Structure formats: C-alpha cells, structure tokens
Image (cartoon, rainbow, N blue to C red):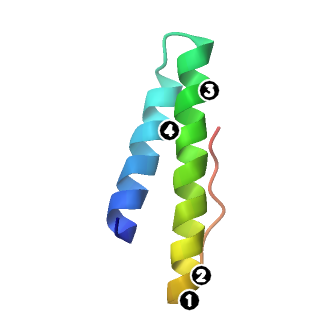
Amino acid sequence: MDLNELLYRQQISLMRAANAACAEARLAHRGLARLYAERIARLCGALRIATLPVSAA
C-alpha cells in the first residue's frame, strides 16, 4: 500500500470510530487507525519523510 492509501484508510477508520454505534466497534476502528499510523510511520521513516503526531482519539 502506498502512503496515500494508508492515510486514506487511517482517516476512514478514525471517522468510523467517531460514528460507531457501540464501544466494541469504536475500539476496533481505533485499533485499525493505530495500525495504519504505525505503517505510515514506518513508511515515512523508510522514505525519510517527517511525520506529524497522529491522534486516534
């Protein structure tokens, strides 16, 4: 997956977490967003791109 796809999927996960109907769904989507954030950080490190702090609130 390229950087744009990872960023897109992370944002979708954060939006789904914010609109989740139950706590379990919210936690699942937040977890996905965190995993995408980790992959983004690794990819940016490999490409030597500075990353901004990402909130998975």
The reply to whether dot 2 and dot 1 touch (C-beta < 8 Å) is: yes
Name the residue type under label 1: Arg
Determine the CA span between mark 2 and mark 4.
22 Å
Residue visible at 57% across and 50% down in the picture: 35
Which label was assigned to residue 45? Answer: 2
Mark positioned earlier in the residue sequence (2 or 3): 3
Q: Position of residue 16 (x, y in %)?
A: 44, 29
| As drawn, 14 above or below 28 | below
Question: Which residue in the rendered view is the most extreme toward the top?
Answer: 22
Name the residue type under label 4: Leu
Give 46 or 49, whichever is nearer the viewer. 46
Q: Select label 4 or label 1 by which is in front.
A: 1
Which label was assigned to residue 27? Answer: 3
Q: Quadrant of residue 45?
A: bottom right
Mark positioned earlier in the residue sequence (3 or 4): 4
The image quadrant where one finds the C terminus is: top right
Question: Which residue in the rendered view is the most extreme toward the bottom?
Answer: 48
